[in-house]
Amino acid sequence: MKIALKKKKIFIAGHNGMVGSSILRYFKKLDLKNIIVQSKKKLDLTNYNKVNKFLIKTKPDIVINCAGRVGGILANFTYPKEFLFENIYIQLNLLDACCKNNVRTYINLGSSCIYPKKSKQPIKEDYLLSGKLEHTNEAYAIAKIVGLKSCEFYNRQFKTNYFTLMPCNMYGPNDNFDIKSSHFIPGIIKKFYTANRKNMENVEIWGSGKAKREIMHVDDLASAIFFILNKVEKKDKKVLAVLKKNSHINIGANKEYTIKQYANMIGKLFKKKINLKFNKSYPDGTPRKLLDSSIIYSMGWKPIISVQKGLRETLKWYKENIK
C-alpha cells in the first residue's frame, strides 16, 4: 500500500495516553518519521496561547487530538466540572489554533457516550442529539459534542478537513487501571489480578452486569485513523465525499456483550476460579451502546483484533507494566 503520509508533519496531541501511544507505535512501524509530540508538562493544551505558539513553531500538516480527561462512570459522576471544562478547552484551543495556522487536516476523537441514552440499536451517526444523554457522564458527553460540532462549523466556514471519529469503548496497552477512575475493562482486569494474588474468593463488579457494551482494541482504532488520513492525503474522492457529508463517523467492532460476559472472559484468563459479586448500588449507565459502523466499513476498513486476543494481550501488558 502506498503511504501518502510519508512527508507530512503529524502532531499527536496526548501521545502518552492509551490512544495516542497506540497511534505513535502504529505510525513508527510504518516508518513515518515526521511525528511531533510534546509532554503535558511542557505543553498545557488548556492554554490557548501556548497551543498557538507551539503550532506556529512546529508547523504541522496534520493534527490528531487524543488528549483529554477520560474515565469511567464513577469519575465522570464525581468530577463533572473537570470533564466538561478540560475537554472543551483542549478541543477548542487546538481547533482554533489549527485554523489560524493553516492546518488543513485535523482528526478529533469523540465517544459513543455522546449519543442519547435510549438510542435505537445499532446507533447511526444521525441519531446524535435526538434524545436525552445518560446523566452519569453528561458533562463529558456535552464537551465532546462541542468538539464534534465545532469541527463541522469550521469545515462549513473555512473549508477545512476537520473530522470526528467516534470510537466505541476502547481498551488495550497503556490504559488507566485505577479502580476509581478507569473504564470497566481495565478495572475488571485489575480486580481479577488482585483477587488472584490475594487468594480472594470474589470479585466485585459495579452495577448489575446486564448492561451491554461494544469494545475495540486501541490498535484497531490506530489503524482506522491511519486508514482515514492516508485516504485523505491521497485525495481519495469517495472517502472525501463521505467525510464531507458526515460530520462524524462511527468506529466500532460490530459486536456487543454484557458486562457480566466480559467479566467471565477476563476471569477465564486466570487459573483460579473466582466468583462474580455484583454491587447494584452502582449505576449501570446506558443500557446498550452498539455503534453502526457501516460507513467506514464501506470504505474498506474493518477491525482485526478479536476480543479474546485483545483481552489476553492487555492482561499480559498489565502484568509486565504494573508498579
Image (tube, helix red, strand yellow):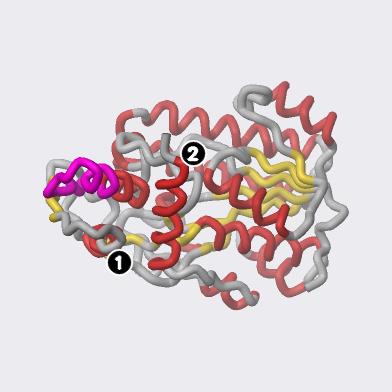
User: What is the quadrant of residue 117 in the picture?
Assistant: bottom left
Tell me which segment is drawn in magenta: 192-206
Q: Is residue 287 left or right of residue 295?
A: left
| Contact? badges 2 and 1 (CB < 8 Å) | no
Specify few, some or many for label 2: CA neighbours under 10 Å numbering under 14, 14-19, or 20 or more: many
> Of tags 2 and 1, which is closer to the observer?
1
Q: Earlier in the sequence, mark 2 or mark 1?
A: 2
What kind of residue is marked 1?
Answer: Tyr
- The numbered mark at residue 92 is none
User: What is the quadrant of residue 221 in the picture?
Assistant: bottom right
Q: Position of residue 207 (x, y in %)?
A: 18, 49
Q: Is residue 14 left or right of residue 187?
A: right
Q: Which residue occupies 58% across, 56% down?
A: 165
- Residue sitting nearer the eye, 123 or 17: 17
Residue corresponding to mark 1: 257
Task: Determine if the magenta segment contains residue 277.
Answer: no
Q: Which residue occupies 78% across, 56% down?
A: 31
Q: Position of residue 157 (x, y in %)?
A: 74, 47
Residue corresponding to mark 2: 143
Q: Which residue occupies 65% across, 65% down?
A: 245
How far, Cα to Cα, is label 2 from label 1? 27 Å
What kind of residue is marked 2?
Answer: Ala
Task: Determine if the magenta segment contains residue 194.
Answer: yes
Residue 115 in sight from this viewpoint: yes
- Name the image quarter holding the N terminus: bottom right
